[in-house]
Image (spheres, rainbow, N blue to C red):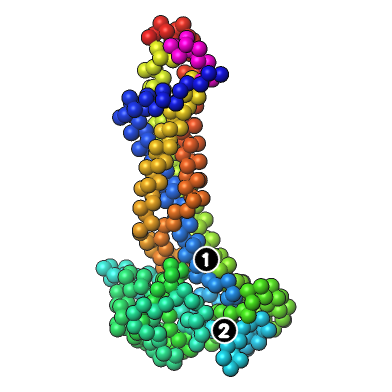
Amino acid sequence: MRAVPLAYSLRNLWTRRLTTVLTAGGMALVVFVFAAVLMLDQGLKDTLVATGAVDNAVLIRRGSGTEIQSGIERAQIGIVEAQPQVALGAGGTALASREVVVLIGLAKRGAPDSVANVVVRGVGAVGLSLRPQLRITEGREFRPGSDEIIVAHNIRRRFEGADLGQTLSFGGRSWRIVGLFDAGGSGFDSEVWGDADQFMQAFRRNGYSALVVKLNDPEAFDAFLLGIESDPRLTVEAKREPVFYADQSQAMSTFLTVLGLALSIIFSVGAVIGAMITMYAAVAARVGEIGTLRALGFRAGGVLLAFLLESLLLSLVGAAVGLAAASLLQTYTVSTMNFQSFSELAFGFRLTTAIVLKTLAFSLVMGLAGGLLPALRAARMNIVEALRAA
């Protein structure tokens, strides 16, 4: 089969510049939406996975699902800390952080009538050291046993009264902000931290929400888990910290995926119809050319491929423009409610190689769907009738 030169398809796209731009623009819009949703979902997952360290384990009450719903008795805390897989610090004490996690309402900056839930986390003496991604950028750490707190930069930017030196009121007490921290893009970037025992008193808690322990060997988690599950005195479940926080993204991730696919399918139908109209118009305007190509020895399959190639090139142009626009979203941070914990969570858009490849494949499918029928029509034209129309 003699192939129609690529230059023929490129020349025709250039000749029809206006329709090429309009059709590619429609496809670019669909690609932008499709890529943006994938980037948002990837950013959410990366944020929550980055929240955990592989050598840390998180324990909550069995069946709770989240730290906020959990409650662990003090007696059970001691049993877990005595497990042989738990790393020991100076003086032989377990490297474990007894934590209290609650939700409070804070007024959004610039909109005092709008209140959002924020996670307040009370940690133990080694709570900060167990999270190496967290660093104090302004001020200092809170003092154990005091009413001092530290807040993430995202909290300071989004909420009133959350700046260094100011006070936040919750749990019937006033808490002074002595430090601002950055948690490296993890979920902790949307939290307020303080002393666990002080929070227990303020919120009248009898037990802790969660226990975070450092393992003496990351490979020891299975043995640690077996010891926890086989002890009848314990009613807790343990997960590696990255796995625990990744599970917190499931509901939001599912929502974003379903919404994104629905929007992409709806918009893609319009883009495919637009590409189809463009290609049908191209076939109708080039009947004489098609007849000449066939008379010169180009078979129907070659004509079919030439018109399909034009449609695919249109989709690739749209993909390039859509991806370029979507990549700019990486400079933005989205703040929304985490469906799992019902708290405010900030995360960004993340463009990866896998998303680029998925988007290109999606765009090519649109181009193929939009160009197939017009290309078949061109390939099936009668040579004599086509030459008479020239």
Q: Position of residue 298 (x, y in %)?
A: 50, 15
Say whether residue 356 is visible: yes
Q: Residue 104 shows which numbered tag?
A: none
- Against 22, residue 140 (above or below) is below
- Against 345, residue 300 (above or below) is above
Of labels 2 and 1, earlier in sequence is 1
- Against 92, residue 259 (above or below) is above
Element type at marker 2? strand
Q: Position of residue 369 (x, y in %)?
A: 49, 31
Residue under the point 37% across and 35% down: 24
Indicate whether residue 289 is drawn in magenta: no
Say which quadrant the N terminus sits in: top right
Tell me the kind of residue under disc 1.
Val
Q: Is residue 203 left or right of residue 140?
A: right
Task: Find disc 1 in the rendering and name its residue.
Answer: 49
Task: Tell me the quarter of the picture where residue 350 sits.
Answer: bottom left
Contact, mark 2 vs mark 1 (Cβ under 8 Å): no
Q: Position of residue 149 (x, y in %)?
A: 39, 83
Tell me the kind of residue under disc 2.
Ala
Residue under the point 47% across and 81% down: 128
* Between 101 and 206, the one nearer to me in the picture: 101
Task: Find disc 2 in the rendering and name its residue.
Answer: 96
Say whether residue 276 is visible: no
Residue under the point 51% across and 85% down: 126
Residue range corresponding to the magenta coloring = 291-302
Within 10 angstroms of label 2, few (less than 14), some, or many (20 or more) residues?
many
Element type at marker 1? helix
Residue under the point 50% across and 61% down: 45
Q: Is residue 140 left or right of residue 312?
A: left
Indicate whether residue 299 is drawn in magenta: yes
| Distance from the alpha carbon under mark 2 to that under mark 1 | 20 Å
